[in-house]
Amino acid sequence: MKQSFYDLSYAELAAVVDENNFNNTVTSVLFNWYYKKKATVPCAGKISKASLNFFEQHYDFSLPDIDTVYQSKKDRAVKFLFKLKDNHKVETVLIPFNNKYSICLSSQVGCAMRCSFCFTGEQGLTRNLSTAEIIGQFLMAWRWLATHRPGEQRILNIVFMGQGEPLHNFDAVKNACDIFLSQHGTSIAAQKITISTAGYIPGLKRWSREIPGVNLALSLHSTLAETRNELIPINKKYPLDQVLEYIDQIPLSKKQFVTYEYILIDNVNDSPEDAKELGGLLVGKSAYINLIPFNPFPGSRYSSPDLDKVERFKAELDAFKIPTLIRGAKGDDVLAACGQLNSNDQHNC
Ligand code: SAH
């Protein structure tokens, strides 16, 4: 089977170009063609016929197929179910804001973290996605917008908050970030890309060394070891205090901050005392808190607190003067909100 062109970082492509003695402009021309222009036809840029033939012959330029598209009637969110070459499926979400979009990408088929509040976690891990399958979600969503919502193909932020634990599939996620960041590629600024983790320390270490400008979000969800162990089982192996200790010693750039995500689950982690503990833990850090009321899914064992409770939790936190946002559940009518993604399409209406 041919290797996918979309698996290659800029440096890897440049090495292939070099090995084959093609003019070194071939790398930037190909990146421009496929990532900046997002062209769907073979490259017609200014490169030699020999280099064009070589890439056509040796590389696969196909992308994942869109199996199903779910469009929210509430808020213009769009969820894509992609079908991969081996028939596995993953989901991707376009989250709207002012006629622009953030894209929520999947990094794995399923997830090994098995968080008890997450629909993907129930699936377990099937396999890692390749770089091409990650980049493919972005390019295919862009093409869909260009066809179905012309003029709206503005995907300005990338969040690795779909299916999977991105730091558990570091190599592919790193290569995808390389392509997103490349000035010849999609040229997206590092501050516009966020990787969300359940606290997988080996991956955190690589993130801090290899792609430190890309933002980090930590799924915190409880300051109490017992509760966090129940919600995020890898807390037993990589406890929160060790994760925070590690994050605290990473030098962040001036404008950079870490996002701490906190799901609010009724009567599990949503009391005023929980809020005070959370504020006490994060005060003084370059932190931003995202409160996410739990999004239910078929068969979920938890429920979401009512709005009053959510607002009280936020009011307690506000005393600590940490910027805090209550994240709305965009796209929840098509199960496109956080934690509602699952590769089995039969649950979708
Ligand atoms: N594995 C990564 C990224 C995927 S989940 C991580 O754990 O961060 C992206 C975010 O959605 C995480 O903060 C996760 O905790 C949250 N999430 C998962 N299930 C959810 C649910 N049912 N309701 C609300 N948020 C959920």
Image: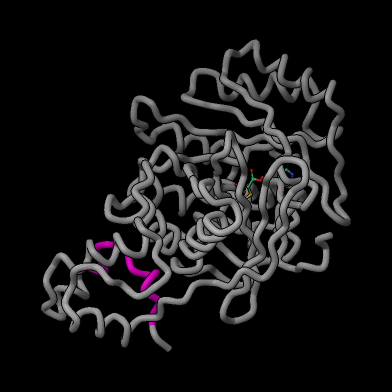
The structure residue drawn at horizontal position 71% and vertical position 46%, both measured from the top left corner, is: 337
- 246, 106: nearer the viewer: 106
List x then y, in percent, for residue 273.
76, 20
The structure residue drawn at horizontal position 44% and vertical position 40%, both measured from the top left corner, is: 192
Secondary structure mostly seen in the magenta stretch: helix
Q: For this view, does 29 lie left or right of residue 223?
A: left
List x then y, in percent, for residue 146.
52, 56
Residue 194 versus residue 114 in the image, above or below? above
List x then y, in percent, for residue 275.
71, 22
Q: Extreme top residue here? A: 319
Q: For this view, does 320 lie left or right of residue 328?
A: left
- Range covered by the magenta-colored residues: 3-14
The structure residue drawn at horizontal position 69% and vertical position 52%, both measured from the top left corner, is: 233
Would you say residue 171 is visible in this rendering? Answer: yes
Occupied quadrant, residue 22: bottom left
The structure residue drawn at horizontal position 27% and vertical position 71%, both measured from the top left corner, is: 44
